[in-house]
Image (tube, rainbow, N blue to C red):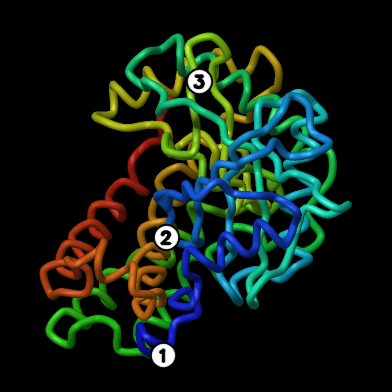
Amino acid sequence: MTSAQHPYTALTPDKVMDALSGLGLWPDGRLLALNSYENRVYRAHLDEPVQGHDPAIHAVVVKFYRPGRWSREQILEEHAFAAELVAAEVPAVAPLVLHGATLHQAKGFDFALSPLRGGRAPELDDLDVLEWIGRFLARLHNTGAARPFAHRPALDVAQFAQEPAEWLLREQAIPLEVEGEWRTAFDAALPLLHSTLQGLSERAIRVHGDCHPGNILWTPDTGPHFVDLDDARMAPAVQDLWMLLSGERRQRTLQLSALLDGYEQLRDFDRRELGWIEGLRTLRLIHYSAWLARRWSDPIFPLNFPWFGTPDYWRGQVQMLHEQIEAMQEAPLVV
């Protein structure tokens, strides 16, 4: 598929406006594309507030799901999970119910709307902020543990390492001069992933799945609220913690300690899961490269990731795989 043939090429601003007006909403012409690659997401302002919602909603976020990524059943599970979180007073942003539904169709796209929420990325150097986030993550996980997903997949080595690696090699996505090195590094990492992440499925609950700082909006008065449950899946609780850690080992230990201080006020945390952090980081590293390669026909990807696919990029991936092999053999963080 070429860039000109990609489905999102047909999603023009006029068609976004038409999708809104088809639901009885009247945009005032202000439409802003938000920072999203997997889906297409827009902020739209309305002439009149959304009917049936209190307080009045004058601006919405419109999310057009990438065709073929999730089934409608899987998308609706995301929406149901968000609604459960809101009902449990967990600060998450859930899709609006319009005409009795949260998922709509227009011009061949599934789409949903949610209220616009303000906020900024949290200050993760502030341990009080991390403790606050930890409390809300515990509440999110208490809801997530109530029942499993029926349609959404689980996070595992097969889907996040083996399958992406096989695809990259089969599609010859790695430059020939680096392919052998990358394959060797991957082959060395794979058995460590299996041993390091043993028992992952036994601890799986419904989690946010992509809980990095960009998916947490912070306001000083109300604290964090969680956005973008697009990657929600069955995974261990630690999946929603490790992406909030950064820096040297001492710094990561302090950050983790603050998160767990808050988390364990409301939910027990099994510290054996800390031994999975570097394995989970390795899964994300492998999956991310395959994700970029698979999305390359989408015109937004070459524009925003011009460095991807070069021999230097893949040499960097080889180096990071070797670093992760070492990290998976080190003692886990202890708090």
| Disc assigned to residue 266 | none
Amino acid marked by disc 3: Leu
**Separation of disc 3 and disc 2 at Cα?**
29 Å
Residue at 42% across, 56% down: 284
Residue at 84% across, 36% down: 52
The spot of residue 229 in percent (x, y) is 61, 47
Residue at 49% across, 17% down: 219
The answer to which of marks 1 and 3 sits earlier in the sequence is 1
The answer to which of marks 3 and 2 sits earlier in the sequence is 2
The answer to which of marks 1 and 2 sits earlier in the sequence is 1
Residue at 57% across, 36% down: 116
Q: Return the residue nearer the eye: 187 or 268.
A: 268
**How many numbered marks have been drawn onto this rendered protein structure?**
3
121 vs 322, left or right, is right
Query: Where 258 falls versus 280 (above or below)?
Result: above
Amino acid marked by disc 1: Met
Question: The N terminus is located in which quarter?
Answer: bottom left
The spot of residue 92 in percent (x, y) is 65, 33
What residue did someone put label 3 on?
259
Amino acid marked by disc 2: Tyr
What residue did someone put label 1 on?
1
The spot of residue 227 in percent (x, y) is 57, 39
Q: Secondary structure at mark 1?
A: loop
Query: Where 194 falls versus 42 (above or below)?
Result: below
Instruction: Between label 3 and label 2, give the one nearer the viewer.
Output: 2
Q: Secondary structure at mark 3?
A: helix
Residue furthest out toward the right: 100
